[in-house]
Image (tube, rainbow, N blue to C red):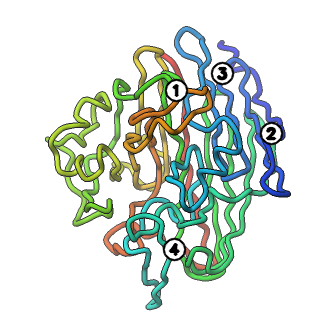
Amino acid sequence: MHRSETATPTVSREHFGRIGDVDVHRFVLANPGGVTARILDLGGVIHSLDAPGRDGEQKNVVLGFPTLDGYVANNRPDAGRVFFGALIGRYANRIGGAAFTLDGVEHRLTTNENGNSLHGGITGFDTHVWQASPFTDAGGAGVRLTHVSPDGDQGFPGTVTTVVTYRLDTRNRLSIGYRAQTDAPTVVNLTNHTYWNLAGEGSGDVYDHLLTIRAGLFCPVDDALIPQGPPAPVGGTPFDFREPTPIGARIDAPHPQLRLGHGYDHNWVLDEPDSLGFAARAHDIGSGRMLTVWTTNPGLQFYSGNFLSSDLIGTSGHPYRRGAGFALEAQHFPDSPNRPDFPSTVLRPGEIYEQETVYELSAG
């Protein structure tokens, strides 16, 4: 049996830097012979993730900044934020017009993209240092992160307490469990915004990666990337990834939705909602590395790294360019608070928001 299937994962903590008088730590989840994931308590960022290819060579397969300074600079409101590896909340993706009405009350949110609220607003969950507690259990090791968002944070109602658990197991699966509670009616939609490059971070673009998404529908958007109309069939369009297809095979096709997103930046309606079902798989043929995603969420935002630019210097010291990584963000649909026809993101006192996404790294 492969060593990674028999050795028990471990967790350790190391100092990563300071923001003012606050220490930032990096937690190392290691499965000997398999995957090593490094998680920051700043924004729950997956800073790096080393995974073996078919030849056993370990490479970091996620995009990020080499030092804390890069994340701090990118979190400024005036920065072109890229959210490398971060936890996203209170509301992942976009809320149109930065406003929604709940129980007859309109809530105005902070605006940070084209008049909309993106990824929780100006200072979302990704900008905070979370309380962190490492743990080990039978067959796994991880870190549990906690953050309390006060009533009115970025315009959202209710005090929301969120606990996110990262856990690495003996099968090279990194699971992310999300749990939140509120003291007043609100909306919640959480995800992780890791960018993947299975050939290795900084190695070039991901357009040769084969991608499969188990979804027969996607959400067309307007020029602000807000869903418009009902979900549309993927059949006969560049959005059909039901069979393994290179990410770049149709990315420049003359399709109006690709022009609006400058590539892929859309929500797919997964075929198996409400259970931990297979959502997607990416495969780098050259290295053999595969990423398989399971989730309880109803949607998957696939973003093809359309706005990455060479002024972003990654953990390896190489500049990132368009398509240097892709994101598979398991979540509820964009603008759901304004779309009663979409699965609800409303959370009320006494209820528990609970979702799980699992990323498995393998090689073949």
Amino acid carrying label 2: it is Thr
Residue where numbered disc 3 is placed: 34
Structural crowding at the residue carrying mark 1, measured as other residues with C-alpha within 10 Å and reported as few (<14), some (14–19) or many (≥20):
many
Q: Secondary structure at mark 4?
A: loop
Relative to 346, is 254 on the left or the right? left
Structural crowding at the residue carrying mark 2, measured as other residues with C-alpha within 10 Å and reported as few (<14), some (14–19) or many (≥20):
some
Say which label, 1 or 4, has the lower sequence index.
4
Percent across and percent down for residue 256 are: 17, 51
Mark nearest the camera among 3 and 1 is 1
Amino acid carrying label 3: it is Gly
Q: Secondary structure at mark 2?
A: strand
Q: Which mark is residue 118?
A: none
- The answer to whether marks 3 and 1 mark residues whose Cβ atoms lie closer than 8 Å is no
Location of residue 71 with respect to 274 vertically, above or below: above
Structural crowding at the residue carrying mark 3, measured as other residues with C-alpha within 10 Å and reported as few (<14), some (14–19) or many (≥20):
many
Out of 294 and 255, give the one closest to the viewer: 255
Q: Which mark is residue 202?
A: 1
Percent across and percent down for residue 97 are: 38, 75
- The answer to whether marks 3 and 4 mark residues whose Cβ atoms lie closer than 8 Å is no
Residue where numbered disc 4 is placed: 110
Say which label, 2 or 3, has the lower sequence index.
3
